[in-house]
Amino acid sequence: MPNSVKTSFRDSIVYGLGNIAVKVVGFLLIPLYTNPRYFSVDDFGIIAVLDISGLILISLMASGLPQSMMRWYWDKDYSGNRKGIFFMSLLFQIFISILFCTFLIPAGKPLSRAIFDTDVMTDAIKLLIISSALQAINNLINTLMRVQARSVLFSVANLLKLITVLGLTIYLITVRGMGISGIYLAQVIGNLFFIILLAPYSIRNSKPYFDAALFRSMSRFGYPLLLANFASAVLTAIDRYALNTMALLKFVAVYTMAYKIASVLKLVIVDSIKMALTPMVLKKMNTSDNHLFYKKSMLYSSYVLMLGIIAVSLFSYEILKVITRSTSFWSAWIVVPILALSVFFVNMRETTSYGLLIKRNSRVIGINVVISAVLNIVLNILLIPLWNIFGTAVATLVTQIVYWRLNYQSSQKEYFIPYEHRKVITLFLTGAVLSFAGLALNDISVVPRLLLKTLCLVVFPFVLYLFNFYEKDELQALKGLVRKWSDVSKLGANLRSLKDSEKEI
């Protein structure tokens, strides 16, 4: 058990560094995107709608292939033909991407008119379609690196891609004056660069192979996940589409800014933990200590995430003032705590759905996400006319709670895991109170405000101690961890111990 946690912790850190780089690049571009010299507030809203449209396209093009490949990659019946499984998946993914481009690129102008009531965005939409098709292929290569626990290669390759996209985006907007189209041209080139960079790795892990029976099994598993991924992407996009339809592009822009701040938590913490844990979950599904590993993974990831939620919620006001070039975006801090707390239930959903993954019950996931998407649409219709972006944020939080609960109940029926509910409730309520405390502090002067917000963050672990959150073994492990990593002279040896832990599993 300790070695599994150590390895998951190590990979989560490496993936996290890579995901931090993604967010750093994103934040470096925010001053450019909010600079009135290059983009208006409405332009920022258009970029937001195009970005979420890209997520929907990728979810359709991926066809559930990454999840299917990951599930069968560790299946003991196919352990000798993993290169063939990757080859078959990659070949089909390339075919799907080409098929989508063939049909959608000619429809660029009608799509621009349907979404924005103008054909000005035609070129940007065509570039978005190509970029999404390439990203779907990239996702499969990323999945291979994840199942092989190649976390360093994963992070380095994606970091090089991000640097390429960042440099090209700045150049195409500020020098070439391409505007919104320049954003998506940079993404096309960056995705092509990634594929070329990892071509030797992909070839080494491929072997010409096709098994019709296996392909049908993977398709049956993947098809419900395709629907689930599509519905999940729609669920992510509904809020901005709803604001675009029922309100103004200005509200789309402000809400998107708040969403970008809160989504740091999902990308850097939730996604990093998921990347590290999912392969480990499948590796350990037949071991004796798997239930302990699963329940502690959920609790510990929730703990780390809540620290992040409190920090982002408290300091969102200051962050917005630093990164934006227009005061129009500063009001976004009002909804950041609500969106940040919704990420807590995203993580809960990911870490309490292991039973559905182990039992290959992907159909239930698809049903649950469709129910959640319908609920989100209804809530947005009801709440946007009343509260604008605040109503959209509340709709997002409520939907994520319901979505988690549906998946949790379904997963527990398939594969029961004794999660520590009292601790999770204590964690959430304590974190929620501290997160909203920042809303009452933003009117005071900067120095006492920052000191009080920092105090709210620091006291969080100690408040949990008062509620008997920690077990004796956990307290001892934390003390040992502090002693180990506080000795700077042994930093190299400690880093090597994380690397060596993988061999001990």
Image (spheres, rainbow, N blue to C red):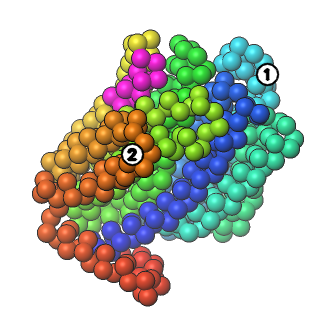
Question: Residue 446, position in %: x, y?
Answer: 45, 45
Asked whether residue 21 appears in the rendered view, the answer is yes
Residue at position x 72%, y 50% from top?
165
Residue type pointed to by label 2: Arg
Q: How many marks?
A: 2
Residue at position x 36%, y 31% from top?
397
Q: Which residues are magenta?
A: 387-400
Which circle marks residue 436 in the picture?
Answer: none
Q: Quadrant of the C terminus?
A: bottom left
Asked whether residue 53 appears in the rendered view, the answer is no
Is residue 416 or residue 430 the one in the foreground?
430
Residue type pointed to by label 1: Val
Residue wearing tag 1: 120
Question: Residue 386, position in %: x, y?
Answer: 40, 12
What is the crowding at mark 2: few (fewer than 14 residues within 10 Å), some, or many (at least 20)?
A: some
Residue at position x 42%, y 31% from top?
335
* Label 1 residue SS: loop
> Is 316 placed above or below 475 here?
above
* Label 2 residue SS: helix
Judge whether residue 398 is colored magenta. yes
Residue wearing tag 2: 449
Quadrant housing residue 63: top right
Question: Residue 40, position in %: x, y?
Answer: 70, 27
Quadrant housing residue 153: bottom right
> Is 424 placed above or below 82 here?
above
Is residue 378 or residue 150 the one in the foreground?
378
Residue 60 in the figure: left or right of residue 377: right
Is residue 182 or residue 463 the one in the foreground?
463
Question: Residue 473, position in %: x, y?
Answer: 17, 71
